Each structure stands twice: as C-alpha cells, then as structure tokens.
Image (cartoon, rainbow, N blue to C red):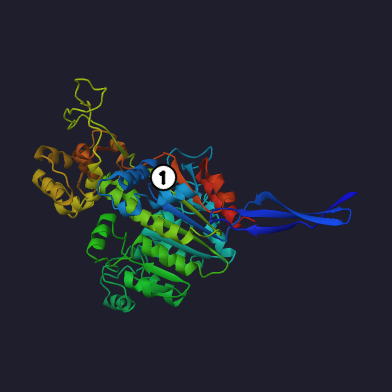
Amino acid sequence: MKMKFVALAVSAALLTGCNDDTQTVEVIKEVEVTKEVEVVKEVVKEVPPTPVTSVKNVILMIGDGMGPQQVGLLEEYAQRAPNSVYKNKNNQTALSKFANAGHLGLSLNAPHGPTGSLVTDSACSATQLATGISAGSEMIGLDTQGNKVATILEKAKAMGKATGLVSDTRITHATPAAFASHQPHRSYEDKIAAELISSGNVDVMLSGGARVFLPQDVASNEETQKQLAALGMPSGVYKKSKRSDNENLVVQAKDQHGYALAFDKTQLMDVDGDKLLGLFANSGMDDGIAYRKCQQDNSCTQPSLKEMTVKALDVLSKDEDGFFLMIEGGQIDWAGHANDAGWMLNELLKFDEAVEAVHEWVKDRNDTLVVVTADHETGSFGFSYSNHNTPKAVALPGDGMGDALYKPKFNFGALSLLDTLYNQEGTFYDIMGDVDGSYNFANSSAEQWQTAITKHTPYTVTLEQAATIHESHETNDDGHPLPHFEDFSDFYVYGTEDFTGKIARVVATQQNVVWGTGTHTAAPVPVYAFGPEGITKQFSTLQHHVDIANKMMAALGVNE
C-alpha cells in the first residue's frame, strides 16, 4: 500500500536584478510512505512573479526641444563621429543605456483634448506632464479653464516626500515653473519666483534666473549689492533685476523659508541641509559650447547640469519617504530656436552627462522610476542630402562594378561633419554679438558677418552669402531691422534674435543640415522608461504627455 502526503509549501523571494520584478520560487515537499519505508522528495515549482507596480522615487528628465531627430544627432555623433568623445564609453550614450535596459516609447505633446491645438509650447507641455490633464498654451499649472491643478511634485510633497527642480535655463522658466507654480502666463516670472520659495513645496531648486529674485534697484543700490556679496553671490549674478518691486527674494528664501544658498560651483559642492536654493546666473546658465570649453581648461565656475543633478540626488535621497525630482536640459530648445546645430549637439551632450549621472545612481535599484522625454521638438531639424559639393568618382573593388566608377549624384553627408559640429567655437548668438551687441544690424556689413562666422564656426562664407544675412524689409518698434526670410517667414517670431536663422541658411550646405522653423513642431517625442518591469512596460507605446503624468503618479502612489 502506497500513501502520498503533500507537506507545507514554502516560498522564497529573490531579487534578480535592478530592473526585474520579485521572483517567487515555491518549494513543495512530498512525502511517500511505502510499507515501512518513508521517502521524501522535493519538487521545485516556479510560480509567476509578483509585478512591482509602485516605487518610492520618481525622476523625470526633460530634454527641452529634444525630438527624435535631435536624439538621432546625438546617437550618430556618439556612435560614428571619427573623434567622438564617447569612444572611451564604447560609443554608447546614457540615453541608449536606458533604452537597452528599460522601455522605449513615443509621446504626443500638443495641447490635449478636443479643444486643444496642434502644437505646444513648453508651459503647456510641462503642465500636462506635471498634472496629467489638458492644459492651455502658455499657462503654468492651470487647466484649460484657468483653474489651479495640483502637480505630481505638489502631491509628492503632500505625501511627505522630498522634491526638487533642476534646470540649466532659469528656475522660473516655463518647464520647471509648471511643476510648482500656478500662473495665467509663463511670462510672470517674478510671481513664479515668489511662489516657488513661499509655497514650501520645493526642497531643492538649482538653476539660473536670479534676476527675478532680486530687487529692481539692485544695479544701483550699493547696500543691496554688499548684502548679496556677503551671501556669496558674484556680481555677474546680481548685475540686473527683472522685478518691478524691491522685494529681495534671495534674502527671504534664506531668512524666512530656511533655504541654504549657493551661487557658484564651489558653494554648491560645500553647502549642506535639506532645503537648497542655487542660483548660478542672472538669466540662463552657460551654453553647451561655453561649458565644453571651460571643462577643457578647468575654468568652470558654474556647476554643470550633471553636478546639479548629483547634488539634488544627494540631498533628496536622504528623505526616507522618497522623492520626486525633475531635471531639465533646457538649452537644447534654445539652440533649436536659433537653428544652430553645433550648439544643439553640445547641449545634447551636456544633457546626456546628466542622464549618465542618473543612470549610475539608479542602475542597481528597484525602488525608482526614471522617465526621460522631451516637451516637444524645436526647429524641425534634420540632416539632408544636397547637390552641393557632390562626391568625386572613385573606383571600387567589388565584382558588381565592372568598368563603372562609383559616383553618387548627391552629397549625402560625410561623418566628419559630426566632429565639425561638435568643435564649433561659439553660438550663432555669439556671432550676432560680435557684429552688434544691441542686435541693431542697420549698419552692419557683409565683412563683419563674414569675420564673425569665421571666428566662431568652422565654416567660411563668401561676402555675397554674408550680405544676405542682414537683408531686411521691415523694422521693429525700436527701429532695428528684422531678418527677412524667403521661406516660412511667419514661423520666425522672435524679432532680431531670428538673425540666427539667416546664419543657419548660409552655412547649411556645409553642414548638410536643414531647418523648417524657428519655433516648435508637433513631432512625437521619445520616451525612455527605466525601473521595475511592472511599471515601465506601459510606457512602450504611443501615448500622450497626460498619460505619462498619470502613469508616473500611479507609480508614486500620489493619486490614491
């Protein structure tokens, strides 16, 4: 007679990797009794894993203006530029590490819903990423009817989590502002500044934009200047104000709201505490080309986007309840508006450095969701082939050539152009500044434009080409000439700043680069999601920014 008894099942949980869910193994003991002999067998039975659907921390990284074509520029440079700075990194970007180990999707970003628009601005897009609801163009933290809506950052703070905002533009600029402010228009930066420090919702703020924190008379008030200098603020940071009153929000942040202050790289590294306000420029921080050059000679005084990111992670991760952190590489967008491909590549590299820092921090964790995306694409950028400087005929050894020479009809762009873009010495704004610092080009000459282009870029243009840059058919309210475009003139909306688009056109054939606009496009943008598989797999689809926000909030548990 044989009897079988099934004993108690025992399970053991094993963590098998930073991006894997919990694996459960069930061990079943079977006991057989045959006559007088007892035989014990162990049967190992794997059961389905329990998906991890919640996390302690969420890190959102926004490459402002970084559409799929901008990502393509970064990846082409990293993988195939003859002198790529990624050669010692196996030609692999940090973005691609997240793509390989996580999930990759796309996101629509226009103002959402049946009453929305086709194209977004950063304020609307960031508001949708922050709130998960439809938003109106150029409004901050409001719904389409102008109602205040709690953001993921504010909800995280209400749960007891730490919060942070990091940007290389201004802390009051549209993208960071949308996560912690509620204003009818993005231009209300002085009100945004006051709201950021008084609300108590943001623990760490690191960026530029000191000009809206400073009293309006700061440029002439020596007592205020001495007070700011005593706090450690360099004169270049307090050189002017954009406030219409004499409120000193920097002093208020310290004395009334408990923020530790930092105004340069050294101070940021040394400052301590769980509330931190870092203002490192009067307006926007150093551009990517200036950053590359100061790195090379070890003269950087401002912290990099990477260094601000590391500091924010160090401070926020001390909170046992977890944190929400938004990090913006904002000048990718500025370079796109300027139609400046060399500057844009350097901004993408600067952003990817920060992505690398986040990857290093999170790669061995299972309690954090990282989402990397863009608010929109800027400039309608693209590499393109042309009939300029077409290749010379060459003989090829292949047995399919016969007596024919290899002679493409068009110039498809040499890989060496990637190194040329990287090595640009200045931005197109630097070129304009050399010609006339006030951007009044009424009396500028072709020789001035030619000289400035030669100084700041690897390109040479003829005097005839240079003369087309300052061609103008109308002036602005100050009497300054406005750039004249033969193509898509209505899509260059920033007045004298858009002379950058004219520079882009005279160097275009030497770059194999084309631009379609001086504003934004509606291109779907990439979405990289890294963290527990039970969360990240839902990002591997075509979605909208309101969906991204709701997925992040669900993962963080702030909508419960």
Does residue 289 sit above or below 244 in this rendering? above
The tally of labels here is 1
Number of residues whose C-alpha sits closer than 10 Å to that of mark 1, classed few (under 14), some (14–19) or many (20 or more): many
Badge 1 amino acid: His
Of all residues shown, which one is farthest toward the top? 403
438 to the left or right of 124: left
Circle 1 SS class: loop
In x, y percent, where is residue 417?
Answer: 23, 42
128 to the left or right of 290: right
The image quadrant that residue 341 belongs to is: top left
In x, y percent, where is residue 521?
Answer: 38, 39
User: Can residue 434 be seen from the camera position used here?
Assistant: yes
Question: Which residue position holds label 1?
Answer: 376
User: Can residue 180 be seen from the camera position used here?
Assistant: no
In x, y percent, where is residue 20?
Answer: 57, 53
Residue at position x 18%, y 48% from top? 457
In x, y percent, where is residue 410?
Answer: 23, 28
Does residue 122 sit above or below 169 in this rendering? above
Residue at position x 44%, y 44% from top? 526
Quarter of the picture containing the C terminus is bottom right
Q: Nearer the viewer, residue 64 or 50?
A: 50
Residue at position x 28%, y 66% from top? 240
Of all residues shown, which one is farthest toward the right? 1
Q: Nearer the viewer, residue 236 or 94?
A: 94
Does residue 476 sit above or below 401 in this rendering? below
The image quadrant that residue 207 belongs to is: bottom left
387 to the left or right of 12: left
Of all residues shown, which one is farthest toward the front? 36
